[in-house]
Amino acid sequence: MDGKHKQAGAGPRVRGVWRSMVPVGVATMIAFGIAGFVDLVHARQNADDDERAAKPAAESQSTEPRRFVGVQRDGAALVVRDLRTGGDIGVPVAAPPGRRFQRIAPSGPGKYVVASYASHRITFQRLDLDKEGRPKGLADIPRAVVPGVSAAWSQMAVHPDGDRIAYVTYQGMTPQVQVVSAKTGQRKMWRTSSPARVSSLSWAGDTLNFLYTPVRPGAAKTAAQMRALDTTGRSGDLRASTPVLKLPSGTGAALSSRDGRTVVAGLTARGQLSLQTYTVQTRQPGKVLWEQSGATSRLVRIVRDHTGKHLLAFGADGRLYADGAPPLREADLIDVAW
């Protein structure tokens, strides 16, 4: 704005001087030249502004995942598939001899941690993809071992630091939340004596958030509660976790934000599936991220990609929902990540 004022004020003085020294036609040409230069500068500024405005959108599109990795239902292999078509990318990755894959979680761009199970022991491997999304290989994480039973309800979450791995094992219907270091193998465990389901693990700093749903045979379904566990404390009773948010009936899965301030809940009601945000401080519903009609099954997982900007939802019927993409039917998978 200051530049415009200076040019406007300078114009009369410039023209006054040149009129006394050169013909009027020459002065007019100079005046048009100055105006043309100013227009050129403004056009360049506008182009720069448009380029800066378009850049975030282009970056968002370039960082949106185009593929996902799934665990086959029989645990025999991992598959990489195209998010839009469901077609395989590369060849399946076989499970280690004598073991079966159970769960998978992202640990970085094109990087994943996979849990495999045999003989009451859960071990972990790292899976890397190349630039085209094809599997490059599977490498053991030798120090990370979790004892216990990996059941159908077991779930896993990898901390953004790539070191801490949280895994839920079961003794009958009672869960144990275990956190193991990939670097040192050090392990902590929190357990409860009450039948319950612990699901939807997500990290927010040193806090592990999860859905806690009591299981009472013959009783009506109980609403799930998001709870928070400070993993810097000692091993002990799972009741050391604190209530964060009570979610409505129909919630199958949830995911805490990385700062712990918001929760995304996957709700199924009257044939409609929706992702609904909640603010932890006010405990009130916020924005509905998306809705999908014709849903016949609850969600079992909500997974974010390594950037934290995109969400993937997985239903108990094998349907896969991603940002803006038509649902895929992946009934041969038991777990997914992207």
Image: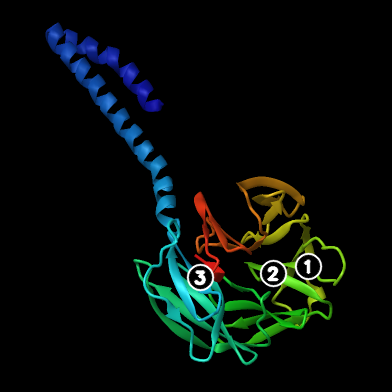
Disc 1 and disc 2 in contact, CB within 8 angstroms: yes
Hey, what amino acid is under mark 2? Ser
Which residue is pictured at 78% across the width and 63% down the height? 225
Mark 3 vs mark 1: in front? 3
Mark 3 vs mark 2: in front? 3
Q: CA distance from mark 3 to mark 2?
A: 18 Å
Q: Could you say which is closer to the camera, residue 170 or residue 187?
A: 170
Q: Could you say which is closer to the camera, residue 257 or residue 171?
A: 171
Q: Earlier in the sequence, mark 3 or mark 1?
A: 3
Position of residue 221 relative to residue 187, above or below, is above
| Left or right: where 256 falls relative to 20 | right
Which residue matches tag 2? 199
- Is the N terminus in the top left, top right, bottom left or bottom right quadrant? top left
Which residue matches tag 1? 213
Hey, what amino acid is under mark 3? Gly
Which residue matches tag 3? 70
| Left or right: where 184 falls relative to 175 | left
Position of residue 88 relative to residue 92, above or below, is above
Q: Earlier in the sequence, mark 1 or mark 2?
A: 2
Secondary structure of residue under mark 3: strand
Query: What x and y, as percent, mark residue 149?
Result: 68, 85
Query: What x and y, as percent, mark residue 109?
Result: 44, 67
Query: What x and y, as percent, mark residue 80?
Result: 44, 69
